[in-house]
Image: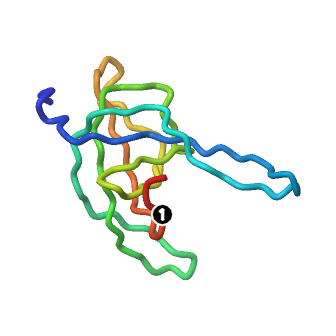
């Protein structure tokens, strides 16, 4: 991995839940980290309950290692929100880079 491969700016966000004056819960997303990433589109598949397989577009984001990033967060890239679909993969135990796998969240742009 060359540092020059990390040429796409992304934002890693966490969800914050608050209650308004009427006690209604709302959620907002707060940017925790702004990073540079290598972005690659790959195909993924998911086994459904009825035994069929669904193919979906998965985006692979390679970033410098940050052990605070979890699958409960999301990524904003190019004005679109992506759900991190599994815990980050470390390239190896000493690696300076890790891989986030994410899928596009329809209807949720950057907030």
Q: Is residue 23 above or below residue 57?
A: above
Query: Residue sitting at 28 percent across and 21 percent down?
Result: 96
SS type, badge 1: strand
- Of 69 and 29, which appears nearest the observer? 29
- Determine the image quadrant of residue 1: top left
Can you identify the residue that label 1 sits on?
108
x and y percentages locating residue 94 in the rendered image: 32, 17
Q: Is residue 40 above or below residue 13?
A: below
Q: Please identify the residue farthest to the front as the structure is shown.
A: 21
- Determine the image quadrant of residue 89: top left
Q: Please identify the residue farthest to the right as the structure is shown.
A: 22
Query: Residue sitting at 61 percent across and 50 percent down?
Result: 28
Judged left or right of residue 85, residue 98 is left
x and y percentages locating residue 92 in the rendered image: 31, 26
Query: Residue sitting at 36 percent across and 31 percent down?
Result: 90
Query: Residue sitting at 25 percent across and 59 percent down?
Result: 42
Judged left or right of residue 57, residue 18 is right
């Amino acid at each position: 991995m060359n540092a020059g491969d990390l040429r796409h700016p992304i934002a890693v966000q966490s969800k914050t839940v608050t209650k308004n004056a009427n006690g209604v819960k709302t959620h907002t997303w707060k940017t925790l980290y702004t990073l540079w990433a290598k972005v690659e589109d790959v195909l993924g598949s998911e086994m459904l309950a009825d035994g069929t397989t669904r193919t979906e577009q998965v985006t692979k984001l390679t970033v410098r290692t940050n052990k605070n990033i979890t699958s409960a967060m999301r990524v904003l890239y190019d004005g679109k929100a992506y759900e991190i679909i599994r815990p980050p993969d470390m390239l190896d135990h000493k690696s300076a880079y890790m891989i986030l796998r994410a899928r596009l969240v329809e209807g949720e742009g950057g907030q």
